[in-house]
Amino acid sequence: MVNLTPIMIEGQPFTAVTVKLPKTNFMAVANDHGYIMCGALDVALLNEKLKERGIVAGRAVGVRTIDQLLDAPLESVTYAAEDLGIKVGMSGREALLKMMK
């Protein structure tokens, strides 16, 4: 099952995506500038093979719900995210708000 849910964070619009898969869930929260995602995100691939695209993204591991994804510290971020001031250890919520600037 796929669930798309519009959410607001401090008055800013985002889209939460949850895909229920056998024995796991895939989750992401995005806007037009970037996204945060569960542990399925391969940040190294984005930084190495797709660097020229300038993808703004962060990864949180060990999360099972969108709320956990928003509150969890980011385990890794892309170079393009770092350029916006998004850092490892920052909450997903904080990172998303930095993507609005």
Image (cartoon, grey):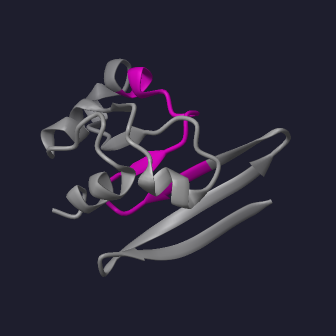
Q: The C terminus is located in which quarter? A: bottom left
Q: In this view, does 74 lie to the left or right of 86?
A: right
Count of residue discs? 0
> Is 79 or 38 nearer to us in this picture?
38
Magenta span contains residue 42: yes
Residue 33 visible: no
Measuring 29% from the left and 33% from the top, which residue is drawn there?
88
Measuring 53% from the left and 60% from the top, which residue is drawn there?
67
Percent x, y for residue 65?
62, 55
Percent x, y for residue 26?
65, 46
Residue 60 sits above or below residue 35 on the image: above
Taking the view exactly as shown, the residue that stands out farthest to the bottom is 11
Q: Is residue 42 left or right of residue 1?
A: left
Residue 49 sits above or below residue 86 on the image: above
Percent x, y for residue 48?
34, 18
Taking the view exactly as shown, the residue that stands out farthest to the right is 22
Residue 11 sits above or below residue 2 on the image: below
Residue 78 visible: yes
Highlighted range, magenta: 27-46
Q: In this view, does 24 lie to the left or right of 34?
A: right
Q: Is residue 101 left or right of residue 4?
A: left
Measuring 50% from the left and 51% from the top, which residue is drawn there?
69
Q: The N terminus is located in which quarter? A: bottom right
Percent x, y for residue 78?
30, 32
Measuring 85% from the left and 41% from the top, which residue is drawn there?
22
> Is 52 or 63 nearer to us in this picture?
63
